[in-house]
């Protein structure tokens, strides 16, 4: 009945990652392409896909707990192994993409920002406002989460402490909005979601869902239609009331819970979603670089119809991003094989 595999991997989450990555790409292309299209889909729906980064945060925390929580709590993995795995997974692609972006748009400021990107520590800056791989701000927030993940596991190791931490994070989020993120504390260009303390409540929501994953999975299977109804109601509330933090917490948490206990899995769990999920972070990071390339080649306005041009540009950009991510992954595998072969030859000598 459950969608979880023996390794603790929930395959249905693949579909959520794939949708989030493509949705964010669609939003960025619409905003940056200057397409004159209207209606609810283009005025409200697609622009709202920017909020899918918070779904990424909840999923990221949940997935990290599935992979590492028990290992860290039981000391089955060292801190060195944990951090090495995190850096090895993200740094090569992000570093290569950052260097490529600086080559395309060189400048003194770009070099400063490149250095910050290469350290993966720019999420600790108070107001980095980095334009080199602008969407990379999420990596900055995510790596602060990775830095504090052992402490995060400590908070989750007691359910009362976990709920207390969630409550404190919710208060922090509120205080950020009404006090700490005003003109007296941060620069005018500051974006609240680039602050880990503002986003912490979403990561903790993912952690809480992990703690109650078995119970929530059974509830989702027994009361699937009720949960879908509640999920739909939260989505409607989002578009009626606006991007309220509590509404987004409920909405994205409900989406994840529905995915955990999904009965009809083919929509979220299939070969396409599994493939796209595996490179979802890469698609998220490189889609704007691919779009800028399409723009320089004058491939973003191929038709007199802005609607058709937009649809074709989205397809072009996503396909190019997928090819770029797959090609980079293939190149890294070949490079590792060459390095290992060279190491063995040196040992034999």
Image: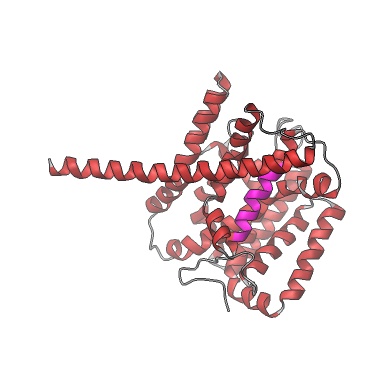
| Picture layout, residue 52 above or below residue 96 | below
Tell me where residue 221 sits by quadrant. Answer: bottom right
| Residue 312, position as x, y percentages in the image | 69, 42
| Picture layout, residue 163 above or below residue 116 | below
Tell me where residue 31 sits by quadrant. Answer: top right
As drawn, the residue found furthest toward the left would be 349
Residue 200: tell me if it is visible: no
- Residue at image point 76% right, 65% down: 231
Quadrant of the frame with the N terminus = bottom right
Residue 88: tell me if it is visible: yes
Judging depth in this view, the residue of 139 and 44 nearest the camera is 44
- Residue at image point 51% right, 41% down: 324
Residue 174 as seen in the image, left or right of residue 113? right
| Residue 23, position as x, y percentages in the image | 68, 49
| Residue 134, position as x, y percentages in the image | 62, 35
The reply to whether the magenta stretch includes residue 150 is: no
| Residue 344, position as x, y percentages in the image | 20, 45
Q: Which residues are magenta?
A: 15-27
């Amino acid at each position: 009945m459950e969608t979880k595999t023996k390794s603790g991997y929930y395959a249905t989450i693949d579909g959520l990652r794939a949708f989030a990555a493509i949705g964010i790409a669609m939003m960025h292309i619409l905003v940056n392409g200057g397409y004159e299209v209207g209606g609810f889909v283009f005025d409200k729906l697609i622009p709202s896909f920017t909020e899918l980064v918070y779904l990424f945060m909840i999923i990221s925390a949940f997935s990290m707990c599935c992979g590492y929580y028990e290992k860290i709590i039981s000391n089955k993995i060292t801190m060195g192994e944990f951090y090495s795995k995190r850096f090895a997974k993200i740094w090569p692609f992000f570093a290569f993409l950052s260097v490529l972006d600086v080559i395309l748009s060189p400048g003194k400021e770009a070099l400063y920002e490149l250095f910050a990107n290469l350290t993966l520590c720019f999420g600790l800056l108070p107001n980095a406002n980095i334009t080199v791989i602008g969407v990379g701000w999420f990596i900055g927030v995510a790596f602060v989460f990775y830095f504090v993940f052992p402490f995060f596991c400590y908070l989750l190791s007691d359910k009362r402490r976990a709920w207390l931490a969630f409550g404190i994070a919710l208060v922090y989020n509120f205080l950020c909005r009404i006090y700490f993120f005003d003109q007296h504390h941060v620069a005018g260009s500051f974006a609240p979601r680039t602050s880990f303390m503002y986003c912490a409540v979403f990561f903790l929501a993912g952690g809480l869902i992990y703690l109650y994953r078995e119970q929530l999975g059974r509830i989702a299977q027994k009361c699937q239609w009720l949960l879908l109804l509640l999920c739909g109601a939260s989505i409607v509330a989002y578009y009626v009331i606006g991007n309220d933090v509590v509404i987004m917490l409920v909405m994205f948490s409900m989406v994840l819970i529905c995915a955990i206990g999904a009965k009809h899995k083919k929509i979220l769990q299939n070969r396409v979603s599994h493939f796209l999920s595996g490179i979802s972070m890469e698609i998220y990071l490189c889609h704007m670089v691919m779009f800028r390339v399409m723009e320089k080649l004058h491939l973003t306005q191929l038709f007199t119809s802005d609607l058709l041009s937009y649809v074709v540009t989205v397809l072009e950009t996503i396909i190019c991003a997928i090819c770029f991510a797959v090609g980079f992954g293939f190149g890294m595998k070949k490079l590792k094989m060459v390095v290992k072969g060279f190491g063995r030859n040196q040992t034999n000598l």
